[in-house]
Every structure is written in C-alpha cells, then in structure tokens.
Image (cartoon, rainbow, N blue to C red):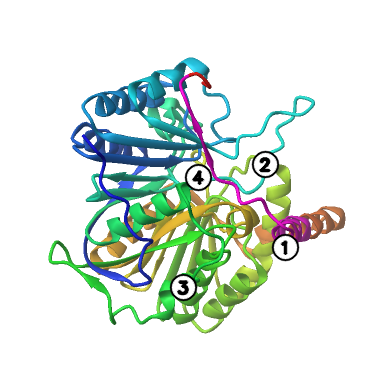
C-alpha cells in the first residue's frame, strides 16, 4: 500500500472543531498510542526524544513492525542523544520490516563523551492516518509508568482529532524531509484566533500547533506563553519540570501577580542537578514577593510541561521553561482554547498541589548563607545566558539521518 501524498506545510491559523482528551502518565498515554497504531491503515509518524528497549519500547517496536508488514507507511524519528543506546538488533528489526527509521543528529562519542548535547530533538508527537495525534512530554520508556517505582515520572500528553492534526502531520513531514531555511516565518498567534480559522464539525475546541526550532521559529513557544501571561485576567497555573525562564517571561509573570492575577507554579521538588536548585531558588524570592504561590512536587520526579490560564486557555507539550527548551531544543506544544479541557487540566494540577506538594513560604525560599545566595545568582545567570549565547552562533541545519538495515 502506498503511503498518503505529502502535504503542504501547516497553515498559520488557529483551527476550530477539534476533539481533545488529556492523557496523564504512561498508564493513559501508551494504551492510546498502541491502540491507534494497531488500527492504522495508511500511515504512522512518530517523533520522540527517548526510546528505550524496555517493556514499552519493545511493545512499540512490535506494533510498528506489524503495521509496516501489513502495508502501513511507518516513520520513526528518535534523537541521537536521548536514544543513543538503541542496539543494532533493535533497529535492524524495524528497518528490515519496512519501518523508515531516522536518528536526529547522531554524533559519535569523542574520548568517551557525548558531544551532541545541545539542539536536541525534544518533541514527542504521534500522528496516525492523518486523523489523530498525540502531543506532550511523555517518552517511550517504562519510566513513565507508576510500576517503575519512586522514580517514575509525572507527566501529560493530549490526544486530539480534528483539523489541527493535519498541521502536526505537515510539520512532521516538513521537518523530516526537505524543509528550507529561508521561507515565510510562521507566526500563528498574529492572526485573531476567531478569524480565518480552519473549521470542522467534528468538535468544538480551538487548537494551534506551536513549535520551536533553530530556523524560523526560535522563540515561538516563549512568545505564546508571554501573550497568555499578559492577557491573563483571573488565574495562571504553570506546571513545569525545569523552570528557568528568560527575563521577559519572568517579568510578565511577576507583573501578572502584581496586578492581582492568582499565579500558582507547580515545580520540581527533586531536581536532578544541584545547579538547577541553586538557579531556581534565585527566582523564588522575586515571585513570592510579587504575590505568586510556589508548590514543590516531591512525591516523584515531575516531568510536566503544561499550563492553564483563566477559564479556557491551556497548553500541553514538550517544552520546559528553561534555556534548553526555549533557546536550543526542537519542541512542540499544542495551545488549546476550550473551557472543558482547561477545567480538567486545572482540576488535575490543583489536586497535585493540594495533596502531593509542599508550598514554599517567602522565608523558606530565602537563602540565608551569603555564599549559597551568590552561588544561586551565579548559576541562574550562567544557565540563562550561556544557551542564549550558543543560540546566537551559527548552527548546523541538522536533519534526521535515515538508518538502513545494513547500517543498524
């Protein structure tokens, strides 16, 4: 069976008429994806940062092989850093079955060290038959299942059907094939969301794909967040694993709290790098003094990248609010205008803050020892400006590399 024809790049419009479902953790995400792959008749497209050879990765491999063998066009793109440890046998089984397997920017180790640390493919997107998609922060790894234990991750994705799926599909194909570095600059939010939107009668939700890359969309996700913060009237909830935003986003967040908007941040209480702890604590005083509330999630690792603003604005995706995601990595978020979806996500996050978090006070957020305070400020500026400096330098136009059976 021939795969569907290639389509143009996504339009610059909001779409109206989507059906959305919030997926929490691997227990909800993996069954949704696996069922969709098993039912695919034409095309399966997947991008992921991490794919491990564990119970989740092996099941994904089995389903992709079965799909390819029944004539479905299958493309799987993994990051060369995040999925470096895939074995040749695992990859060969896919390619020999007809799966088009690609690695993004694979680089050999030098003196035993990995050199492809920055500008990673961090997106997690799935598109099935051009009619349904999943976008979020969940990798194909057993680490996203509660049975993994205390180190299992808390995270989200969104399943969507409707006209925005074609935008996700077209962006996947544009990025993974022959995208040009010199074309129109996609700024979807510059058009009013109610005007010239792609409409469908399959649902009622407005949705827009927003990406960050190293070509034409370097600050799109940050820009959308800032617009949401500046327009907030009542409440803002941000749940983010790595919260180290740029100065402009921090300023908009502080100003929202100062004008009376209820601002709640759900952040990682167990950061895996000490420098992240020093840097983020340098922000706590400023936000708490402005009136924001900060909740640290301490039950297990927080991997979420979601937000809810007022009654109907929300976003779910792969982008953290840190220098790597905002300035270097390839990311994808779905921005949603739907009151029911926003209410569902808000209730979920409020439940975490109430039952599984510790709220910081201004006194607790301060760092009395002068040396530790200075280290925190130093770490903050180092993490904030180094990636920005790297982003200003010329970058290779990295593209996924197709891996054939004999190369695996």
- The quadrant in which residue 162 appears is bottom left
| Distance CA(mark 2)–CA(mark 3) | 28 Å
Mark in the foreground, 4 or 3? 3
Q: Mark 4 or mark 3, which has the lower sequence index?
A: 3
Q: Is residue 317 above or below residue 102?
A: below
> Which residue bears the numbered disc 2?
117
Q: CA distance from mark 4 to mark 2?
A: 22 Å
Q: Could you say where residue 168 lies in the image, as x and y percent from the top left?
A: 35, 55
| Magenta highlight on residue 403 | yes
Q: Which of the numbered marks, if any, corresponds to residue 109? A: none
- 190 left or right of 242? left
> Which marked residue is nearer to the observer: mark 4 or mark 1?
1
Single out the mark in the foreground, 4 or 2.
Answer: 2
Q: Which residue is mark 4?
A: 302
Q: Callout 4: few (<14), some (14-19), or many (20+) C-alpha neighbours within 10 Å?
A: many
- Which stretch appears magenta? 381-405
């Amino acid at each position: 069976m021939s795969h569907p024809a290639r389509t143009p790049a996504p339009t610059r419009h909001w779409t109206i008429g989507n059906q959305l479902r919030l997926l929490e953790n691997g227990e909800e995400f993996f069954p949704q994806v696996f069922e969709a792959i098993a039912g695919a008749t034409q095309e399966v497209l997947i991008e992921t940062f991490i794919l491990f050879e564990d119970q989740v990765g092996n099941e994904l491999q089995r389903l992709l092989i079965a799909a390819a063998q029944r004539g479905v066009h299958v493309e799987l793109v993994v990051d060369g850093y995040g999925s470096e440890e895939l074995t040749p046998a695992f990859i060969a089984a896919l390619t020999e079955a007809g799966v088009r397997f690609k690695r993004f920017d694979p680089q050999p180790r030098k003196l035993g060290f990995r050199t492809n640390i920055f500008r990673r493919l961090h997106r997690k997107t799935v598109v099935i038959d051009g009619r349904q998609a999943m976008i979020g922060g969940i990798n194909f790894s057993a680490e996203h299942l509660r049975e993994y234990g205390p180190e299992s991750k808390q995270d989200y994705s969104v399943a969507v059907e409707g006209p925005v799926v074609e935008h996700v599909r077209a962006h996947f194909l544009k990025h993974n094939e022959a995208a040009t570095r010199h074309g129109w600059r996609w700024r979807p939010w510059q058009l009013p969301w109610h005007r010239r939107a792609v409409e469908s009668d399959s649902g009622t939700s407005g949705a827009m794909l927003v990406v960050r890359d190293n070509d034409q969309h370097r600050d799109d996700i940050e820009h959308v967040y800032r617009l949401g913060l500046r327009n907030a009237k009542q409440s803002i909830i941000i749940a983010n694993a790595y919260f180290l935003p740029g100065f402009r986003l921090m300023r908009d967040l502080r100003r929202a709290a100062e004008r009376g908007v209820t601002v709640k941040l759900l952040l990682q209480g167990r950061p895996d790098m000490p420098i992240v702890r020093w840097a983020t604590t340098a922000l706590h005083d400023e936000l708490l003094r402005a009136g924001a509330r900060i909740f640290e999630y301490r039950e297990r690792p927080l991997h979420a990248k979601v937000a809810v603003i007022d009654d109907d604005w929300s976003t779910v995706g792969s982008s953290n609010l840190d220098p790597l995601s905002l300035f270097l990595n390839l990311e994808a978020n779905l921005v949603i205008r739907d009151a029911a979806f926003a209410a569902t996500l808000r209730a979920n996050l409020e439940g975490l803050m109430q039952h599984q978090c510790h709220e910081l006070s201004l006194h607790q957020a301060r760092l009395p020892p002068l040396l530790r305070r200075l280290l925190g400020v130093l770490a903050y500026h180092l993490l904030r400006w180094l990636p920005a400096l790297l982003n200003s330098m010329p970058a290779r136009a990295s593209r996924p590399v197709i891996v054939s059976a004999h190369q695996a």
